[in-house]
Image: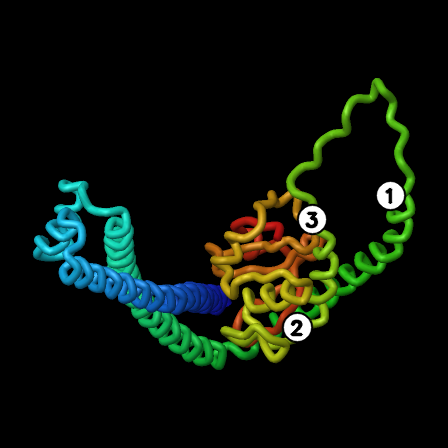
Amino acid sequence: MNQVQQLDSSLERAVEAYNFATVKLNRVRADLKANHAQLQVAKQSLKRAQDTLSARLVSLYTSGGQSDSLEVLLGASSLDDLVNRFNTANRISAQDSHVLTQVVHLENEVKAREVRLKHANAQAAALVRQRASDKASIEGQLSARRTLLSSIRGQIAHLQAQEAAREAQLRRQLAARLAAQQQQAPATALASTVAPVVSPDSGSAPAPVGPAPPPTHSSVVSIAMHYLGTPYVWGGASPSGFDCSGLVMYVFAQVGVSLPHSSYAQYGMGSPVSRDQLQPGDLVFFDGLGHVGIYVGGGSFIHAPHTGDVVRISSLSGWYASTYVGARRI
């Protein structure tokens, strides 16, 4: 069974690598879209400024305007030469100076945006290739997993029965904790309305350790429990099927918190929390950030484990304890 666990771990990391590449690709594509629109605006502005400069040249030439401006403007062989002449002569009119400065600025902006677009297009192409490679890896590992499982069906059935019994116990414990919290809530709310009497000699109250869990944390756990038994689907982020980061993203979205669909990206959100300070609703990460779940208290967490499994409650022990990376409070 160690071989199955190793394969599941490798498969989950491949899924989350695919998800992370998708998150980055979406960001690059959004930047591409915005930068392309800004490039078009800059090009249109440059065209108007160039037309204004051309009209000014014609006006100076046909009307016999300021000889200094005419000498500088008409004596240039290129825009760069014109800039150099302007900088050295310093005799051009304020109007011509403004037009010229605008043309130079817009031309530089167009060039810079074209470079950014070229770089972003190359980055997007690399991410598309990475996703294709990750997908091929996932499909290959899924095939290997099916072959391996077919050869050890008896052992799997026995282990699944043990896991189901453990999960049923964890589920009962969680339901009891949630019920107790709901009963305590009215008393806590009443107590909070009574101002404590503080002696002048008592000093200030001790500072809290770490950021306090937001009120939404208790709702997160309750919402996640509704999806116990939902099948694992790689790339899934809906009640029809979840992968690990898809479950976290979907549940937090129900309380108005937007998270990326990637365990690697989710680890960069919120604030770090030490293991001894875990509170229900914190995110817990495992296996080199290749897996994520939602802590529910009592040393347990809800997660979508791996392909072939369902959303379940597991204990933060055994393999999960040995591969534990850290936690974040959103």
* Label whose residue precedes the other's in the sequence (2 or 1): 2
Whole-angstrom CA distance, mark 3 to mark 1, is 17 Å
Is residue 244 or residue 329 the one in the foreground?
A: 329
User: What kind of residue is marked 1?
Assistant: Ser
Disc 2, SS: helix
- In the drawing, what numbered circle is on residue 161? 2
Disc 2 crowd, CA 10 A, few/some/many (<14, 14-19, 20+): few
Q: Is residue 3 visible?
A: no
- Determine the residue located farthest toward the front in the rendered image: 63
Q: Is residue 12 left or right of residue 187?
A: left
Horizontal and vertical percent position of residue 153: 54, 79
Mark number, residue 213: 3
Nearest to N terminus: mark 3 or mark 2:
2
Viewer-nearest residue: 104 or 329: 104
**Tag of residue 98:** none
Q: Could you give the CA–CA distance between mark 2 and mark 1, rounded to whole angstroms?
A: 46 Å
Q: Residues within 10 Å of mark 1 (few under 14, many from 20)?
A: few
Looking at marks 3 and 1 on the same chain, the residue that comes earlier in the sequence is marked by 1
Residue topped by disc 1? 192
The spot of residue 316 in percent (x, y) is 62, 54
Residue 296 is drawn in which quadrant?
A: bottom right
User: Is residue 240 visible in the rendered structure shown here?
Assistant: yes
Q: Residue at x 29, y 65 (%)?
A: 48
Q: Position of residue 101 (x, y in %)?
A: 26, 51
Q: In front: mark 2 or mark 1? A: 1
Q: Amino acid at mark 3?
A: Pro
Secondary structure category for the residue under label 3: loop
Q: Toward the viewer: 298 or 5?
A: 298
The image shows residue 137 at horizontal and vertical percentages of 37, 72
How far is disc 3 from disc 2 in space, using C-alphas?
35 Å
